[in-house]
Image (cartoon, helix red, strand yellow):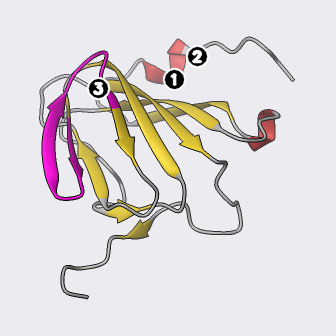
């Protein structure tokens, strides 16, 4: 296992592109958590829309301002914010700004690779 991991800045050179680098996951020796570095361009957001996970998901915002919705509550968060999406709680994120956002995506426990990572959020009244 590599104990030091570095972000590959070449992957994040285009501010108009959503880019992800997995820094730690089961394929790189993790047993309990995964961590990814993610850039979301202006106008981009959760590819799944409003969704849920079977695991906890945490974002640590490094750059830009991210809009989030968690359990129906909408917030704007900037650098230094820690966002918690508990397992089973409907959520989404998007970038309504003009600059890309960058955040760390932390997932615990490790997601089961045999199950979908995200599923659409149940509709109200369902």
Sequence-earlier tag: 3 or 2: 2
Percent across and percent down for residue 99 are: 19, 22
**Magenta highlight range:** 67-82
54 left or right of 75 in image: right
Q: Quadrant of the C terminus?
A: bottom left
| Residue at left offset 53%, top offset 36% | 106
Q: Is residue 19 left or right of residue 30?
A: left
Label 1 sits on a secondary structure element that is helix
Residue ID for mark 1: 11
Q: Is 9 rendered above or below residue 94?
A: above
* Above or below 10: residue 26: below
3 or 2: mark nearer the eye: 3
Q: Say whether marks 3 and 2 touch (CB < 8 Å).
A: no
Q: For residue 13, which quarter of the picture?
A: top left
- Residue 9 on image: x %, y %: 51, 13
Which of 19/111 is in front? Answer: 111
Q: Quick one: label 3, few (<14), some, or many (20+) residues within 10 Å?
A: many
Q: Quadrant of residue 71?
A: bottom left
| Residue count near mark 1 (Cα–Cα under 10 Å), binned few <14, some 14–19, many ≥20 | few
Helix, strand or loop at label 3? It is strand
Q: Position of residue 124 (x, y in %)?
A: 19, 79
Circle 1/circle 2 CB separation < 8 Å: yes
Residue shown at the point (14%, 39%) measured from the top left: 75
* Of callouts 1 and 3, the N-terminal one: 1
| Residue position for label 2 | 8
| Residue in the picture at 25% in, 43% down | 44
Residue 38 versus residue 41: which sits nearer the camera?
Answer: 38
* Tag 3 residue: 101
Q: Is residue 18 magenta?
A: no
Who's the residue at 28% across and 52% down the image? 92
């Amino acid at each position: 296992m590599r104990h030091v991991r570095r972000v590959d800045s070449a992957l994040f050179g285009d501010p108009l592109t959503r880019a992800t680098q997995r820094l730690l996951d089961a394929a790189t020796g993790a047993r309990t958590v995964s961590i990814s570095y993610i850039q979301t361009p202006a106008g981009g957001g959760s590819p799944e829309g409003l969704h849920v996970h079977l695991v906890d998901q945490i974002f640590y915002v490094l750059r830009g301002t991210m809009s989030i919705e968690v359990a129906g509550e909408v917030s704007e968060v900037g650098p230094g914010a820690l966002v918690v999406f508990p397992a089973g709680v409907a959520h989404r994120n998007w970038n309504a700004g003009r600059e890309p956002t960058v955040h760390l995506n932390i997932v615990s426990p490790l997601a089961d690779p045999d199950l979908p990572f995200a599923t659409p959020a149940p509709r109200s009244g369902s």
